[in-house]
Amino acid sequence: MALLEVSNMTHYFGGLRAVDSYSLAIDPGEIRGLIGPNGAGKTTVFNLITGIHVPSEGRVSLNGRSLIGLRPHRIAALGLGRTFQNMLLWRHMTVLEHVKLAHYSQISYGLMSAFLGSRKLSREEIRIEENALRLLEIFDVAHYADQIVTNLPYGAQRRVEMARAMAIRPKVLLLDEPTAGMTTEEMIQMIGIVRRLHEQFKVAILLIEHRLKFVMELCGRIQTLVFGEVIAEGTPYDIKNNPKVIEAYLGREDIT
């Protein structure tokens, strides 16, 4: 049984079929890629997997448990983390507060302990702060811990968002355009960061990305989505040399 399994997932917006019979199976520790032109339905696939939309047809399961109909926060608590193409960061909060807040879906103390300020609460709060700082170190943003997140450079904000997604200790991490808006130097740095978190946490990763160097460097297998339908799946070499992919997508992109 795959860790994350999607079977024949189809979705309509009104009369428009946005995703057509999409299937995916990710095993623990894999890094997979999803590419395709703008409007292909890639982010819609992520939204369907994470509960923002409910598929019109098909199945989605994590560790054998169906995710269909669950709210996004319940899906996250089960071990499915994600980032967004358009970052969702709170303007009034510091970097450390962002990552600490994400831990609260995993807390073990109850309302009474929180009200009474028990020893258990104090221990848990210390653990949360220590883990948040450790994540900020991994993503090379610990020196920004006390700064308001929207004051950071764009690439650093992206890394804060990823640290926040890792705070829930996901089994699978979905990255939606993690290098969007980054310079080439920042993109190369992000390749190293993704490799490091993958090695350290053994998390499975599914990523959407237009920077094909990023995808080809990191992913063992890649799917190409066009008009909501997978037209090719294989290794980076297979995808780079697939005539359908070249015609629909790669012919208009810079692989380097």
Image (cartoon, rainbow, N blue to C red):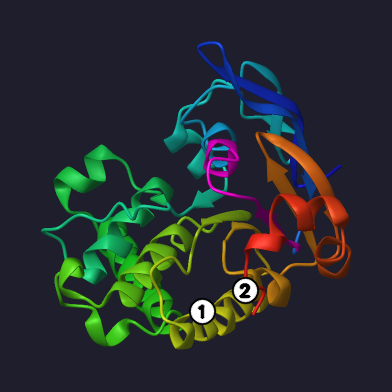
Residue 19 versus residue 222 in the image, above or below: above
Q: In whole angstroms, how far apart are the C-alphas of marks 2 and 1? A: 9 Å
- Is residue 252 at all visible to an observer of this figure? yes
Residue 125 pos. (x, y %): 28, 63
* Residue 27 appearing in the image: no
**Lateral position of residue 244 relative to residue 43, left or right:** right
Q: Position of residue 167 (x, y in %)?
A: 43, 61
123 to the left or right of 38: left
User: Which residue is labeled 2 in the image?
Assistant: 214
What residue is shown at x 80% (from left), y 42% (from top)?
231
Q: Which residue is pictured at 23% across the width and 39% down the height?
A: 112
Q: Is residue 167 magenta?
A: no
Residue type, mark 2 in image: Phe
Q: Quadrant of residue 97?
A: bottom left
Lower position in the chain sequence, tag 2 or tag 1? 1
Position of 115 relative to 178 (above/below)? above
Three-letter amino acid code at the position of disc 1: Met
Viewer-closest of 114 and 54? 54
The single residue placed furthest to the left in the displayed view is 92
Point out the stretch of residues depicted in magenta: 30-45
Mark 2 surroundings: few (<14), some (14-19) or many (≥20) residues within 10 A: many
> Which tag is nearer the camera, tag 2 or tag 1?
2
Of residues 99 and 255, which is closer to you in this image?
Answer: 255
Circle 1 packing at 10 Å, graded few (<14), some (14-19), many (20+), is: many
Q: Which residue is mark 1?
A: 190
Indicate the secondary structure of the residue bearing disc 2.
Answer: helix
| Position of residue 5 in the picture relative to residue 116 (left or right) | right
